[in-house]
Image (cartoon, grey):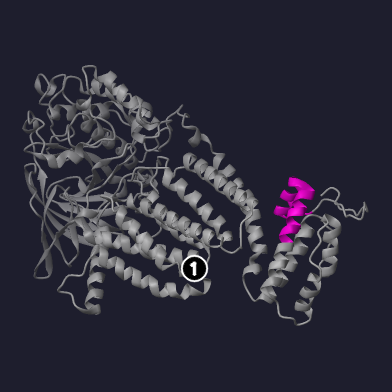
Amino acid sequence: MRAVPRILYFACFVGLALVAALALDRVVEPSMATTLSRTVFIAAACAAPGLIYRKLWPLAIVLVPVGCYLLLRTIAPVPEAVEGIAGQYHFYVDQLYEGTLFYQSSFFPLPISESPQVQLLFAFTLYWLVAAAGFVGLSLHRPLAAVVVLLVVAGFGLTVDTVERSLWPALLFVVLAACLLVLSRGIRRPGWRVREIVAGGVVGVVAGALALLLLVTTPSVVATPWQDWRAWDPFGDNEPVYTFNWLQNYPDLLDPAKNAVVMTVESSLPSYWRANALDQFTGSAWVTSQAFSRRVVAEQRGDSYVYEMPTAEIAPPGKTATETFAIQSVSTYYLFAGGDPRVLTFDRSVALFMNSMRSLRVSAALGPSLIYSLTAVVPDLDPTDLVGLGSDYPNSLSGYLTLPFRSRSDLPGEDGEQAWRETLSGGSMSDREWLGLYSLNERVVGDATDPYQIALRLERHLRNSYTYTLQPPASDYSSPYAAFLFDTRSGYCQHFAGAMALLLRYNGVPSRVAVGFTTGEPADPGIYVVSRNNAHAWVEAYFPTVGWVAFDPTPGRNLPADAGSSTSPGFVDPFAEGGSSGPGTVITEPPRENFPDEGGEQGETEGTTSGSWLKRATWLPWVVGVLVVAVGWPVARGMWRRRRLHRGSLHERLRASVGLIRTELSDYGAPVTPAHTLDELLETAKNHVRLEPDPGFADRVEAVVFGGREASQADLQKSESLRRELVKRLRKRHGWVRTGLALYGVPRLSVRNRRHSGDWYTIGG
């Protein structure tokens, strides 16, 4: 019978590790589930000798490194040119180092097909984490520590906000963890009793139900968070590091009271200073999926290092500008550029990477003071250059057209709105939030078919019909962009840019969101002071034969260069009748609220008190806190009182067990004191709950405590068996109310001794 619980215990551990591995697999693309599953089985097998026989646990220390070596050989075979153990060691170290560099320069989901080394890095890391969990959980029989280690892996995979959310891995992890903790008792005892199996099952069900409740009511793996857990806060107390991704903390960043200079730019042409672009829309956020996989090699010229960028396949015509960036008091992974970067000059050699969106990133953060020069091409377009270019887009741009729902052109039938409603009716609640998208798009775009005309109409509508505010009202919509478009109609640059980009894609126009800074305040001719209040997001749309063109739908922001946007200087709408004075002329300066760089006080719009029940339920954290304390206190108290049962010599553990017998009687109101001998304690237990200990038990224990007799494992087992039986009878006699008070250590209210058929009774306790 003892083999059965060990097998089940091992299977439960492997299942728990597989769930963690599959959660980790969600952050890579394409899937490497087979490799990660093989990693779990090898690590668990190498760490399990102590489960077969307790004294074999040192064997795991030998097997785990051997298993790691075999795993590395199966994933990345050693080339024939590598000879000897030392050569293999250096080969795998180099592979892991290259995987680390790729990981540092990539975004989730990681495109592992571009770098086999990152697959090796993931498998290597997972192996050692599972092996560590297996060593403590299988060989040393410490399941709680094993669960904590595996939770690191599962938590990493389930909290990456660019990955589609799913409930089942988190819930399955909780259930398997509960089963592992319950099964840990079975490998220490000759057999199981029915009540222990039932109790373990109840624990698993209750734990799963509580986990389900927390997971669906708090911003976690199944909820859509308004704020990313990796929220961008480059100006905190610690050294700031730019991590340009979506859900940046713009309301805190654009605070006039906390304004600070980020950099000074000397440029022959004004521009927006771009850091990166966001190309993937999840329904609730815009994120980056493009890896910085293209290494740019430097050429040393005197004391400088010159990096020549690969030429873009298609780029808008423009003027060449020389730009010098003097970044101060901030570290950055990203290098800013005004326009398309061509040549970068540094005073040092750095590991520079470029992605397919022409963004620049270094492998290690630079700063807090940094100066570099850049030659870039700032677009110089006439609006008429963008008219009539059509929609013949290359296949490489298909990723810039994807949405979590169908686009307008993909709707079947002649009745587009009915088809749109039928498409979303079978989806989730979050999908049905977009029911109004078709009618909104029809009102704004109308009969426009030219991609450039569509872009201008969307830009104009957002600038004229929506309000800028750093504190948008609360909404019942889970997606901040659905709330912005259909409910609150107010927000900041993220909302404007993200909304226009998704509407462009809905109309079949490739688009993305650019992030960086606006031009800043001019100090001297050609010199611009850029502060944190200039942080901004705008839109880039693609046009055949021209390339990516910038648009800015945020009210009060204007692109400084001659381009296709209606916010460009001297813009004339080519689709307007009668030229610049005609009715179709785009208004570039609509009425607006106080902007952060104007020193206006930000506040919520009047009368906007609506919001989801979760956002209004300010009592929820207090209730959850009270529940955690209510459940955690008796558990922690019980573990603290029983801590001496599992450490020290048999003599010390036996004394601790006898002390717990006295404590249990005292908790239930039995008249015992620290002065009572063991005989007196047993006599009290006999009178109180009719518990009859084994004859001679007290004499044997007192001989150990006072007579110098050596304690045995049998003595400890009998003492613990007696204590458990005592607790069971005390609970049965006093009921659940008194039992609950005893668990919390609440002293009895009043106790009096009353003789009734030779028993002790507790009154009022």
> 747 and 332: which one is in front?
747
Magenta residue check for 639? no
> 38 and 341: which one is in front?
38
Question: As shown in the figure, which amino acid type bears the numbered disc 1?
Answer: Ile
Instruction: Say if 600 sits above or below 333 in the image.
Output: above
For this view, does 509 lie left or right of residue 138? left
> 674 and 43: which one is in front?
43
Instruction: Say if 693 sits above or below 590 in the image.
Output: below
Q: What stretch is highlighted in magenta?
A: 723-747
Which residue is rendered at x = 33% and y = 68% of the image? 68
> 166 and 416: which one is in front?
166
Magenta residue check for 736? yes
For this view, does 395 lie left or right of residue 198? left
For residue 704, which quarter of the picture? bottom right
Which residue is rendered at x = 59% and y = 60% of the image? 185
Q: State which quarter of the image contains the N terminus.
A: bottom right
Location of mark 1 (residue): 52
Helix, strand or loop at mark 1: helix
Q: How crowded is mark 1: few (under 14 residues within 10 Å), some or many (20 or more)?
A: some
Q: Can residue 364 be seen in this view?
A: no
For residue 114, which quarter of the picture? bottom left
- Residue 521 is situated, as x and y percent measured from the top left of the image, at 24, 46
